[in-house]
Image (tube, helix red, strand yellow):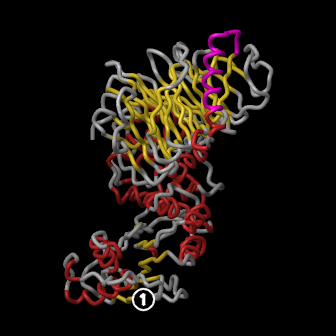
């Protein structure tokens, strides 16, 4: 226990009736006990309306002000399965939405002493009753019990009158009646027909789910599963799944549970689309345009019918998907200077190809990792036998600087161009020679940028950023030590007023800005406990914008001159980014190549 630490005084917490104070004090004492001795589990039992949820809500309201009672995650378990519970817990712990097995693995490696709250565990479970994944017991056995086996994790759990988790040596409070209801059970048994009848109608008589009550949206799919008779049940469920309006407005957790059942027929490729979007759709996105944008992004390139239906509503949001090439595993990405709408991408085999940034259409091959040419492109004059680029900085359509997975800088010239070959070879030679003199000079990141003239930006293990002009020969770069840790990602942009802004990310989770004619900013523009996986910047009609992808799956858009940040809830991992001046963001990673249109006119509105 921390020397001199004492249990927080219950009098300093939110008001609690005298008859509840003893129970509140027990919960507070349990949470504040950081000795490692005592039960990891605190169970709150009692009948509906006895005040169980009120007690946990009271604790949560006061816990944030006391370091020893800080709650790291609160998962409202009602209607959740093991999968959706894991997504919610993973997001709150900072891991991102993970499967139960991956969540357990990450939690086991977390060095923090974790405290979680689980209200309404007795109401968990969703989907067809005969499906194991729908059962409350599956959530307990596959997720909660393994979590409680971790010595650094403790949980306060509401279990109703059920004997859940009884064998874990828990501290238990049994609430008979605190005179403070929980708001009812929420388990009304209205029929499917009654619930659908309560939904307002459109002009042509269809259900208008955008005006349905929260109660109907939560319960109607479960009611459809309870419909008498297999044919009637199938018709009810099929009707909801075939209604895109319900997909946008209905309960995302209920839909996820139902679509897990492969026996239920679905229209088009909905099951594949929903599986892709569900981790984000279940993250409390209540705005219909945002839910439509997420579902639309998952449907683009997979389900044309659903894509077209959702497009008008998705386009009302501040971002929306434009195109997708899902078969590619993209490791490197950059806009091609001097080529209108040209985008250079490297796949996992090392093959470099160019695409039209507006449509995603392939424009041809640039070079393959072998010494031969690809798709009619000339053989590279300077290119090793095997290359797996993890970053690329194009000089033009015929030449580029590559950062291989072996951390070597390599020039690529696909035509007989002595000027390009000489300039790129000079950069590779400079950093190769520097690396021989000390490990701090080993190259760890490569980026590109510039509209007036193309640049290559190089980051090294010692935290120094080097800016090279690719448009003209440069014997030495402009260099500055920007980080105390190795550089993990770099990019740059030149602005209309003549500034060259260089952005870099370090292994300490800091993103920094260096205007190359001055000293770097003294403080990071962003600092997180995750690694940056990709950077891209552009000078747009709204001013310079920086896109930052993080290892926890978040994608941030930073308005450089005002410091405002928006989080784009992307559906996939991101290893590479490119951003055009018109606001088209291209995202590359293991799940393919995707383009997203940003509405620059409303991007920074709240």
What x and y, as percent, mark residue 137? 57, 75
Q: Nearer the viewer, residue 1 or 365?
A: 1
Residue 308 visible in the current orientation: no
Q: Quadrant of the C terminus?
A: top left
| Residue topped by disc 1 | 172
Q: Is residue 602 above or below residue 201?
A: above
Q: Residue at x 41, y 59 (%)?
A: 218
Report the predominant secondary structure element of the magenta stretch. Answer: helix
Q: Is residue 274 magenta?
A: no
Q: Which residues are magenta?
A: 414-433
What x and y, as percent, mark residue 163? 50, 86
Q: Residue at x 37, y 30 (%)?
A: 515
**Mark 1 neighbour class, 10 Å CA radius: few under 14, some 14 to 19, many 20 or more:** some
Q: Nearer the viewer, residue 190 or 25?
A: 25
Q: Quadrant of the N terminus?
A: bottom left
Residue 194 visible in the current orientation: yes
Q: Residue at x 33, y 90 (%)?
A: 176
What x and y, as percent, mark residue 212? 34, 51
Q: Is residue 335 above or below residue 160?
A: above
């Amino acid at each position: 226990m921390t020397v001199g630490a004492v249990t927080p005084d219950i009098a300093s917490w939110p008001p609690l009736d005298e008859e509840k104070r003893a129970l509140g004090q027990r919960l507070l004492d349990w949470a504040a006990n950081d000795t490692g001795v005592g039960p990891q589990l605190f169970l709150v039992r009692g009948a509906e309306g006895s005040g169980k949820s009120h007690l946990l809500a009271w604790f949560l309201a006061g816990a944030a002000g006391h370091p020893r009672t800080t709650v790291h995650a609160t998962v409202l378990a009602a209607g959740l399965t093991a999968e959706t519970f894991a997504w919610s817990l993973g997001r709150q712990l900072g891991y991102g939405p993970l499967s139960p097995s991956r969540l357990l693995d990450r939690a086991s490696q977390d060095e923090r002493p974790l405290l979680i709250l689980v209200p309404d565990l007795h109401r968990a479970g969703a989907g067809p009753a005969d499906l194991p994944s729908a059962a409350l017991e599956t959530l307990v056995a596959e997720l909660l019990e393994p979590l409680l086996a971790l010595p650094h994790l403790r949980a306060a759990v509401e279990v109703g009158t059920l004997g859940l988790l009884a064998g874990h040596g828990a501290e238990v409070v049994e609430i008979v009646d605190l005179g403070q209801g929980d708001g009812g059970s929420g388990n009304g048994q209205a029929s499917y027909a009654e619930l659908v009848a309560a939904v307002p109608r459109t002009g042509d008589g269809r259900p208008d789910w955008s005006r349905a009550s929260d109660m109907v949206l939560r319960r109607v799919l479960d009611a459809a599963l309870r419909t008498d008779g297999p044919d009637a049940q199938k018709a009810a469920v099929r009707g909801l799944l075939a209604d895109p309006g319900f997909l946008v407005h209905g309960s995302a957790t209920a839909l996820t549970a139902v679509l897990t059942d492969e026996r239920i027929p679905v229209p088009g490729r909905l099951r594949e689309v929903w599986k892709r979007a569900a981790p984000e759709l279940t993250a409390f996105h209540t705005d219909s345009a945002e839910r439509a944008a997420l579902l639309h992004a998952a449907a683009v390139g997979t389900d044309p019918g659903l894509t077209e239906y959702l497009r008008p509503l998705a386009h009302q949001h501040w971002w929306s998907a434009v195109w997708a090439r899902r078969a590619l595993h993209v490791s490197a990405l950059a806009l091609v200077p001097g080529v209108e709408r040209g985008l250079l991408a490297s796949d996992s085999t090392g093959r470099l190809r160019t695409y039209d940034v507006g449509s995603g259409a392939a424009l041809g091959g640039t070079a393959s990792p072998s010494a031969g040419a690809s798709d009619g492109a000339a053989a590279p004059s300077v290119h090793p036998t095997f290359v797996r680029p993890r970053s690329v900085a194009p000089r033009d359509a015929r030449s580029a600087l590559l950062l291989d997975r072996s951390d070597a800088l390599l020039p690529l010239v696909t035509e007989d161009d002595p000027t390009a070959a000489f300039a790129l070879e000079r950069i590779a030679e400079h950093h190769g020679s520097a690396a021989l003199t000390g490990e701090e000079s080993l190259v760890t990141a490569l980026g590109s940028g510039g509209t007036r003239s193309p640049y290559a930006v190089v980051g090294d293990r010692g935290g120094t950023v080097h800016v090279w002009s690719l448009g003209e020969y440069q014997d030495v770069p402009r260099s500055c030590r920007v980080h105390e840790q190795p550089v993990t990602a770099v990019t740059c942009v030149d602005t209309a007023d003549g500034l060259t802004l260089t952005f870099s990310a370090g292994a300490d989770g800091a993103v920094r800005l260096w205007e190359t004619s001055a000293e770097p900013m003294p403080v990071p523009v962003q600092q997180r406990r995750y690694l940056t996986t990709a950077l891209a910047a552009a000078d747009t009609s709204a001013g310079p914008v920086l896109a930052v992808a993080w290892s926890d799956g978040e994608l941030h858009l930073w308005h450089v001159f005002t410091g405002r940040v928006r989080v784009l809830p992307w559906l996939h991992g991101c290893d590479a980014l490119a951003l055009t001046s018109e606001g088209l963001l291209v995202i590359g990673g293991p799940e393919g190549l995707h383009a997203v249109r940003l509405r620059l006119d409303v991007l920074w509105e709240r």
